[in-house]
Image (cartoon, rainbow, N blue to C red):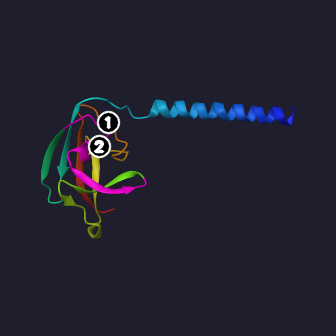
Amino acid sequence: MSKKSKIILAVVLLAVLAAAAFFIWKANAPAQQAGSKTVTVEVVHGDGSKKDFSIKTDEQFLRGALEQDKLAEGTEGQYGLFITTVDGETADDSKQQWWCVTKGGARVNTGVDTTPIADGDIYEITLTTGY
């Protein structure tokens, strides 16, 4: 096999692998729902008090819904928004506090920037102490 044939074969193989990786990623990507939807966010404050918020939104991801209603704010990190304040309460780093996002009691494995929302979803955001 000539050197030119080997290079062409390598390029074709690389293109096939890249296409396969794209289709696998696309098949496993979280589903997004476009259009108007209502999601509920239950905020559990540091003192244990709870407050429910019903958010009507056209946003596709949780971050957009939270920011639309000015419910959460934070700083930009390598994974998107790192929530520091929810419903006016700011996590205290000196006490190792942070906001934990769950859905149905189970931790969400994505950041709020990439957590897709659908009509009727219920999320909990809890001020948690200890890393």
Assign a secondary structure to mark 1: loop
- Residue at the right extreme of this rendering: 2
Give the x, y percent position of residue 71: 20, 49
Q: Is residue 128 left or right of residue 114?
A: left
Disc 2/disc 1 C-alpha distance (Å): 7 Å
Q: Do the residues labelled 2 and 1 touch (CB within 8 Å)?
A: yes
Give the x, y percent position of residue 104: 25, 40
Q: In this view, does 5 lie to the left or right of 63?
A: right
- One can see residue 43 in this view: yes
Q: Is residue 14 above or below residue 91?
A: above
Give the x, y percent position of residue 120: 22, 32
Of residues 8 and 17, the one nearer the viewer is 8
Give the x, y percent position of residue 99: 27, 55
- Residue at the bottom extreme of this rendering: 94
State the residue position of label 2: 64
State the residue position of label 1: 60
The amino acid pointed to by label 2 is: Gly
Location of the C terminus by quadrant is bottom left
Quadrant position of residue 74: bottom left
Q: Which residue is drawn at 33% across and 44% down?
A: 108
The amino acid pointed to by label 1 is: Gln
Q: Exactly how many numbered labels are in the figure? A: 2
Q: Which residue is drawn at 28% across and 29% down?
A: 35
The image's mark for residue 24 is: none
Magenta stretch: residue 46 in it? Answer: no
Q: In this view, does 32 lie above or below 51?
A: above
Q: In this view, does 121 lie to the left or right of 3?
A: left
Of residues 115 and 102, the one nearer the viewer is 115
The span picked out in magenta is 56-78
Q: How many other residues sit within 10 Å of disc 1, few (<14), some (14-19) or many (≥20)? A: many
